[in-house]
Image (tube, grey):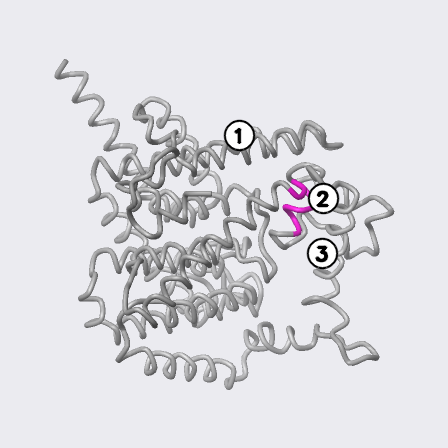
Amino acid sequence: MKNESLYQNNLINILSYFLVLLPIFLISGPFLSDLTVSILAISSFFFLRNKKYYNNYFFIIFILFWILILISSILSETKILSLKSSFFYFRFCFFSLFIWWILEKNKNILKKIYLVLFFSFLLIIFDSIFQYFNGSNILNMKIVHSDRISSFFGDELKMGGFMMRLFPLLMALSFFFFKKKHEKYVFLWIIFIIFVQLTIFLSGERTSFFLFNISIILFIILLNNFNKSRISLLLIYLIAILTLFAIESPFKKRILNLTINQIQIDQSGKPKYIFSQQYHEHYLSAWEIFKDNKLLGTGPKSFREICKKKEYNFSSLTCSTHPHNIPLQLLSETGIFGFIIYLILNIIICFNLFKNLFSKLFYDKEYLNNFQISLLINILILIWPLSPNGNFFNNWLSIIIYFPVGILLWELRKSKKMYPKSIKKKHFLSKFYFTN
């Protein structure tokens, strides 16, 4: 019996280190991170025995979405391609549930995740600046494009996306561990944020730079406390942005000048395209595909093939692996049913964030703590509807999305409102986040 218990504890320790090292695996590429998620998802079938992990609204809604995309794939013209994405999509649900479970076993794992994530950010910041001045990074990886620094990501060019997507999670974890003491370190955090912004700027990723600034604005507006430093933080941050754009550089040309140059005006004085002609045609094609496949769409990851059809193809710029916008991708590939789930999720997150802001301003009550606010901002930014996005069904992006979801599930673990048929009133967030 002792040997069995010891074996189980050793196995849990090994699995916890997989989770702790996940930020580094995400930097290394898709293989190790996807392998980690698969291992943790499979492990959840052996360890998650308590019915609370399955009798909750997150699990129920996710399984409904999974069944939906499975049916969409089966009915798709590109069945094999689509099923490769949708059939094993359930592993992301169990990945989140595993995070919930293992943090209940040992919440100190969260501190290790925080330290690894913080170290990863510091290393990327240093390496990116080093690569900018040296022409190659500390591993002798050369600059791929003169206007795009990629650090350890090489020719994948998603260093800015990595930092933008995981920065709110890093903020959330810092609030969890420092709590009210966090205000003592505001100046240090301002410096750190400016360096993160600079690094994303050097990446040349326009969407990442835009969404990072959106997340900072949301933090300034929505966070509790920080009343004394809120205005000074905003001023310093605006000065940092203006400084970046005041200095002539290939990065400024890519992020600012190229964006402005892509905005074409028609005869009526209105923008001719949404973002650019290429994105505009992606969106238009996705919308036309949706209009012909309203209920279930054409199947996950099918856009790359369906867009080649004559009725959906407008020029050589139309087709891509995905429409580069999450709402339009879900509409075209999963139909109105998939989009409704996405829309409800956005409404619930925004409702909770601004309800907390309203209550704080008018009733001096805080229903959410900064840890919860940051996690919700993180998820909101990851599925932001009003900008170009990556492929929603991409494994690397899905891992980043479901990482903070698992931590949020753990944070709400004591709430009875997470579970169906519960009438006990608990926390405001759980009341609206997991109920219909």
In-front residue for pair 339/423: 423
Verify whether residue 335 appears in magenta. yes
Residue 253 figure quarter = bottom right
Q: Residue at x 57, y 42 (%)?
A: 393
Residue 130 figure quarter = bottom left
- In the image, is residue 248 above or below residue 224? below
Q: CA distance from mark 2 to mark 3?
A: 13 Å
Q: Residue at x 35, y 26 (%)?
A: 43
The first of marks 2 and 1 along the sequence is: 1
Q: Which residue is mark 3?
A: 283
The dot on residue 304 is: 2
- In the image, is residue 257 above or below residue 366? below
Q: Residue furthest front?
A: 423
- The magenta stretch is 328-336
Q: Residue furthest top?
A: 1
Residue type, label 2: Arg
In-front residue for pair 381/350: 350
In-front residue for pair 355/5: 355
The secondary structure type at the circle numbered 1 is loop
Verify whether residue 166 appears in magenta. no
- Horizontal and vertical percent for residue 209? 50, 68
The dot on residue 88 is: 1
- Horizontal and vertical percent for residue 114? 28, 52
In-front residue for pair 358/169: 358
State the predominant SS element of the stretch in magenta. helix
Residue type, label 1: Phe
Residue type, label 3: Tyr
Q: Residue at x 37, y 73 (%)?
A: 194
- In the image, is residue 46 above or below residue 273? above
The first of marks 3 and 1 along the sequence is: 1
> Which quarter of the figure is the N terminus placed in?
top left
